[in-house]
Image (spheres, helix red, strand yellow):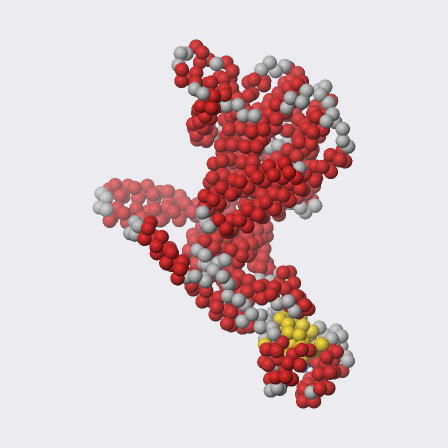
Amino acid sequence: MTSTGLVVFGLVSLLGLMSLLPPLAGRLRLPYSVLLAVVGVTLGIVVTLRPDQAIPSSMLHDVIDALGSVEVSSEAFILIFLPALLFEVALAIDVRRLVDDIAPVLTMAVVAVVICALTVGFTLAQASPFGLIACLLLGSIVATTDPAAVVGIFREVGVPKRLTTLVEGESLLNDAAAIAIFTLLLDMLLSGGDGSIGGTVGRFFISFGGGAMAGFLMGRAACALFPLLGGWPQAEITLTIALAYLSFVVPEHYFHVSGVVACVTAGLVLGSIGKTRMHSHTFEQMEGVWGQLAFWANSLIFLLAAMFVPRIMEGTSLKEIGFIILVYLATLAARFCTVFVLLPLLTRAGLMQRINNRIKTVIVWGGLRGAVSLALALAVIENKSVPAATRDFIATSVTGFVLMTLFINGITLRPMVGFFRLNRLNPVARGVRDRAKLMTLTDVAAQLADISQREGVDREIADAALSNLEARLAVARARSHRGVELMADEMVKVGLTVAAAHEVERCYALLNARIVDRHIAEMLLREAQYVREAVRGSGRKGYARAAERGLGFGPAFRLALWLQRYLRIERPLADALADRFEFLMMQRQVLSDLVPFARDKLQPLIGEEAAGEIVAISARRSELVEESLLALKLQYPTYAADLQRQYLGRIARQRESAAYQSLAANLVVSGEVERELRAELERHWTGLDGRPKLDPELSAIDLVARVPIFRDLDIKRQQSIAQVLSPLLVLPDSPIVRRGDKGDAMYFIASGAVRVVVDPSVELGSGDFFGELALLTGHPRNADVVSLGFCKLLALKARDFNRLLAADAGLKERIERVAKERLNLG
Ligand code: CMP
């Protein structure tokens, strides 16, 4: 076989072997990486010892030759496999949670890496003759943790998602931090150890920060490209692969900042916003592709690196074993300090929730090391400028240490989880499980009876099957009543969490059906995720607070109002209003599903009482949305009608498209006919995807014509009045005038209503005016005036007030008369 042929043969043999390992690991209940290591080391021994020489089988010879020929350089490891591994983990991380827990994650990642590198570095520098920098380098290599084993177990036993994110986030960022430190130290080692500590730390931060910035920009740029790819999933997925590798190479090579950090950041950006930018369904497909790539990368790094082990460990002296044990103890001590000393400090500072000691112990013990440590060690081994003795020292220590974590911690991790009883469901989860079982068994029994009857199954056989089910049902029924009522509060929380997750799904469904634009979908998703987090944090109170806050006017809206009012720039306000309009309409649409969802799907799981509460909470939320929508509709009825028309059009388009799709799926029409029908549909529904323009209707002259006092004046006069009046939009329930303030303007109401807070309070509507008293009398404002809904007002500044009144006796007389009446009333 040619050498290329051998490498290909070797690689595919490894792939074939790899395909058998995950199920085997599952059956042996071992972490996958432990099994990989065992297989890799065994292969390494076979390749070194060549037992095949004794057997005359040319194919066996070839396989072993082929395995021996798959030698991947550390550069290839780092350039090919590392981006795949890092990008995939980053993609899957819930960025919102990561940001919420950024303090503990960064502590665990960056601070822990530093602590680990220092502990290992100083300990070994005392015990070995290799100098501090080499020992620190070793420390940075062994500081990267491989979360797969712990996360796998955490997922199985259902520990809170926050902890999984903590461990995953930690490993992701600590890879980045450790590699950045590693690169710096390697430079220092090669340049003979010059360079001040301050300079090194400074370079570390520049490299880290610059990498993050580069990754962020590249991630955003890729997301901006997706809409241009015409909805080709293959093209979109290929772009993500290009992004992962380009973000790894370009920042490092051209800008000398950390490529690892950039790659991780780009992955995080894509994971958080990519789903709404890509064509619908591409995201799941892409996750599948990345899962596959990462599986190959991880397995190959492990197998190939483990195959080196026998060669590296050959002839290891007692002293070297001593170093390995020292590294093991030092890393364990460093991790213990981080988890048991540093994290509680963060809890005390209010930066993270308390973690119980059992979970902390599992996190310490679960700090397995894996592919990244091995790849970094390889990089040192191959670097011929590093002194040979140092290379050997680092290679044996790292390899031995990684094997120790795998074989000692990896194998005992699951028994430890069992020992701490972390694998037992908490009472609430048990309650949900029992009810889910009851619900399902009841359903299955009914279906079985029905099928037996319809299909004429023998009576006896059917009865036997049913009585079997009945027995299980009886147990489930007895259990499902246990203690659940006592935990109604917890059940409401469970239900709200599920409802909030359902809300997120609904948002994606609307986006995929092209009923809502990407921009609005992102607003809805943000809101849904915000509510979900709030439930997790503080239960139903959190939910209610978050729901209410979601309907408030954010800083962007207020800025838009400010720009209109003081600079007369209208566009941002028009956009903000249109956004809010559509957001509320779609929010109503999303929420309309929550009440039936709670009643039909949640009730059997969480009980009637808790489901009832969720129905009430959801109904209240819908009501709030409805009120906010009504307030807008009152001001902009034509726009509301435009949006409704568009909404119906989009629904029609989606239904039509779904119908053709289903006809094609059932083979009623051919693919060709379907394409034709769809093309026709797209032609028919053009113009549905833009948004109707919203006119904020704040032109002074139009508003002047709507105020009765000015309405009958001639157009010239109206125009000159309009010049001194400034139109403004006021949000519902906002104070316009405050009692006791100095008067600087009076207001005419062009549309909407306000409340004057006197006793009893007075409501003023379109055509009325207020704020004139302070201007006429020079006294402070005599009452608060608050808007009732959206109001369009015309403000007349104090300095224009006298001029306008002097020029118009009728107006003056009218205002003074009303003022007098109001003063008499006061
Ligand atoms: P000013 O005092 O400048 O600010 C508060 C405004 O509330 C006041 O002007 C009037 O325009 C208005 N106001 C005060 N009292 C009454 C009232 N009894 N009825 C209607 N409007 C009033």
Identify which residue is drawn at 66% across, 31% down: 182
Q: Quadrant of the C terminus?
A: bottom right
Number of numbered markers: 0
- For residue 240, side relative to residue 656 (left or right): right
Q: Quadrant of the N terminus?
A: top left
Q: Where is residue 259? Give x, y as percent.
A: 62, 37
Q: Where is residue 320? Give x, y as percent.
A: 64, 18
- For residue 774, side relative to residue 146 (left or right): right
| Quadrant observed for ligand 1 in the rendered image | bottom right
- For residue 58, side relative to residue 272 (left or right): left
Please, which residue is most extreme toward the top here?
A: 54
User: Compared to 736, does 358 lie above or below?
Assistant: above
Depth check, front residue: 555 or 270: 270
Depth check, front residue: 149 or 239: 239
Q: Is residue 419 shown to the viewer in this render?
A: no
Q: Where is residue 790? Give x, y as percent.
A: 59, 71
Q: Where is residue 643? Give x, y as percent.
A: 48, 66
Identify which residue is drawn at 67% across, 18% down: 389
Depth check, front residue: 113 or 618: 113
Q: Is residue 274 shown to the viewer in this render?
A: yes
Identify which residue is drawn at 42% across, 17% down: 60
Identify which residue is drawn at 41% across, 61% down: 685
